[in-house]
């Protein structure tokens, strides 16, 4: 091998090393990009769920699901402070979530309870839409909804709540809560 061939061989090896270095740099950059996207998605999910859970009507719903016999702020705009809160039991919730017929009427408190549950399920519907469109995963939502999925799917008001979701078109909420419950560590 003469000097020219040696120089060409060294140049060729140098080009291969440069190419391999570029491939490694590309892979490393892509992984950093994926990590950054995951982090942004996690922050976005947390903001979305925080917005849902910060809604006073959603807070009411969660209190009604969690507590049997609790004072709930159903009428925050009532000028008489003693009329703003209503003692709500699980039986009151069950009655409020009954299926509406032409003969049935709802008290103001029952209507307010229904409105609170509607607001909660609208938020869960939005999360289910994000899952279906692969913006988030079920695991992303599970962190925030696992406890509530168990209370809704298997709690003492589950038959009324599930029937309410089915009858009033909250099938995305039902689907997402079912998926979260089926993967729950609380079971």
Image: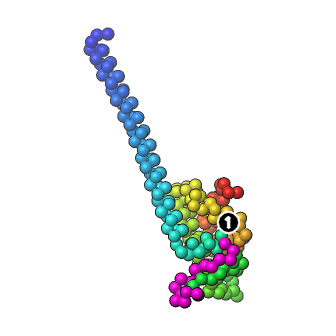
Q: Which residue is drawn at 47% across and 55% down?
A: 41
Residue 65 coordinates in the image, percent (x, y): 65, 71
Mark 1 lies on residue: 151
Residue 90: in magenta span: no
Q: Which residue is drawn at 68% across and 77% down?
A: 69
Q: Which residue is drawn at 43% across and 49% down?
A: 36
In which quarter of the view is residue 62 placed? bottom right
Q: In this view, does 165 lie to the left or right of 49?
A: right
Q: Which residue is drawn at 66% across and 72% down?
A: 67
Decide: few, some or many residues near mark 1? Use Cα within 10 Å; few <14, some 14-19, many ≥20.
some
Residue 42 coordinates in the image, percent (x, y): 49, 55
Residue 80: in magenta span: yes
Residue 7 coordinates in the image, percent (x, y): 28, 17
- In the rendered view, tell whether residue 66 sits above or below residue 176: below
Work out which quarter of the rendered image holds the N terminus and state it: top left
The residue most toward the bottom is: 80
Residue 50 coordinates in the image, percent (x, y): 51, 65
Between residue 187 and residue 133, name the one nearer to us.
187
Q: Give the range drawn in magenta.
A: 67-83
Q: How many labels does the image show?
A: 1
Can residue 49 be spotted in the picture? yes
Secondary structure at numbered mark 1: helix
In which quarter of the view is residue 26 placed? top left
């Amino acid at each position: 091998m003469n000097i020219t061939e040696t120089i060409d061989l060294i140049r060729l090896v140098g080009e291969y090393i440069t190419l391999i270095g570029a491939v490694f740099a590309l892979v490393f950059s892509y992984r950093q990009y994926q990590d950054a996207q995951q982090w942004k998605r996690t922050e976005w999910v947390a903001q979305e769920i925080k917005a849902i859970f910060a809604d006073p009507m959603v807070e009411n719903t969660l209190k009604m699901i969690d507590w049997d016999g609790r004072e709930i702020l159903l009428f925050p705009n009532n000028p008489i402070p003693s009329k703003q809160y209503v003692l709500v039991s699980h039986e009151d919730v069950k009655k409020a979530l009954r299926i509406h017929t032409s003969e049935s009427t709802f008290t103001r408190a029952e209507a307010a309870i229904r409105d609170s549950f509607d607001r909660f399920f609208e938020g869960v519907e939005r999360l289910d839409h994000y899952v279906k469109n692969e913006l988030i995963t079920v695991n992303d939502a599970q962190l925030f909804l696992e406890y509530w999925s168990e209370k809704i799917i298997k709690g003492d008001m589950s038959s009324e709540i599930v029937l309410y979701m089915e009858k009033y078109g909250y099938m995305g909420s039902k689907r997402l809560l079912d998926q979260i419950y089926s993967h729950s560590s609380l079971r």
